[in-house]
């Protein structure tokens, strides 16, 4: 059984930065794609960033140049460095892991990515203007 636990969320002003972490416990095969998706209140899930075991990444257009996904697979930890935050980045951020997907596919099929592997309980990010 795999558990994913996010941390690092909080409240910041527009232009600020946050670093999210996702600690994975249990056996997570190295072939899994890991990533972050978010869900704002009343809105659909949105894939944010994903990374595979080789370090290949994919980002949503809305966060390119501002967010950076990284991983330390030896520590089973996934990170999301968020900079130049905007009010529209306000959402619950979830960590997820799934097999059989590339990072591009994980973002293009966020619902499948979120529901057919493992995901954490989420961490809230609130950006005020």
Image (tube, rainbow, N blue to C red):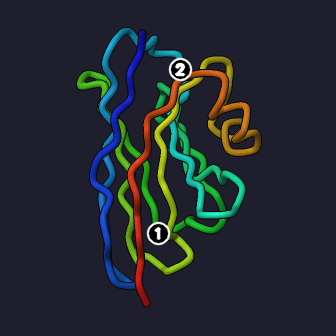
Label 1, label 2: how many angstroms apart (C-alpha)? 24 Å
Q: Label 2, secondary structure: give it.
A: loop
Residue drawn at x 43%, y 48% as measured from the top left: 69
Instruction: Choose between 98 and 42: the one closer to the eye.
Output: 42
Q: Which mark is residue 108?
A: none
Q: In this view, does 75 lie above or below 104?
A: above
The reply, left or right, for residue 18 in relation to residue 125 is left
Percent x, y for residue 74? Answer: 26, 21
Instruction: Choose between 73 and 92: the one closer to the eye.
Output: 92
Percent x, y for residue 124? Answer: 40, 58
Quarter of the image for the C terminus: give it.
Answer: bottom left
Choose top left, top right, bottom left or bottom right for residue 26.
top left
Instruction: Choose between 14 and 56: the one closer to the eye.
Output: 14
The reply, left or right, for residue 106 in relation to residue 37 is right
Percent x, y for residue 15? Answer: 38, 84
Disc 2: which residue:
32
The reply, left or right, for residue 106 in relation to residue 66 is right
Residue drawn at x 38%, y 22% as measured from the top left: 3
Q: Please count the marks in the image.
A: 2
Quarter of the image for the N terminus: give it.
Answer: top left
Choose top left, top right, bottom left or bottom right for residue 120.
top left
Percent x, y for residue 47? Answer: 63, 50
Q: Which residue lies furthest to the front in this view?
A: 42
Q: Residue 66 carries which label?
A: 1
- Crowding at label 2, few (<14), some or many (≥20) Cα neighbours within 10 Å? some
Residue drawn at x 31%, y 19% as measured from the top left: 25
């Amino acid at each position: 059984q795999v558990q994913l636990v996010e941390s690092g969320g909080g409240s910041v002003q527009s232009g600020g930065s946050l670093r999210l972490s996702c600690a994975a416990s249990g056996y997570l095969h190295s072939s899994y794609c890991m990533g972050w998706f978010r869900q704002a209140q009343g809105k659909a899930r949105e894939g944010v960033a994903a990374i595979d075991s080789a370090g290949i990444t994919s980002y949503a257009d809305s966060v390119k140049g501002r967010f950076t996904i990284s991983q330390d697979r030896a520590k089973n930890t996934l990170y999301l460095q968020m900079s130049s935050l905007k009010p529209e980045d306000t959402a619950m951020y979830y960590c997820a892991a799934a097999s059989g997907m590339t990072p591009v596919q994980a973002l293009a099929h966020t619902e499948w990515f979120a529901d057919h592997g493992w995901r954490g309980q989420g961490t809230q990010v609130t950006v005020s203007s």
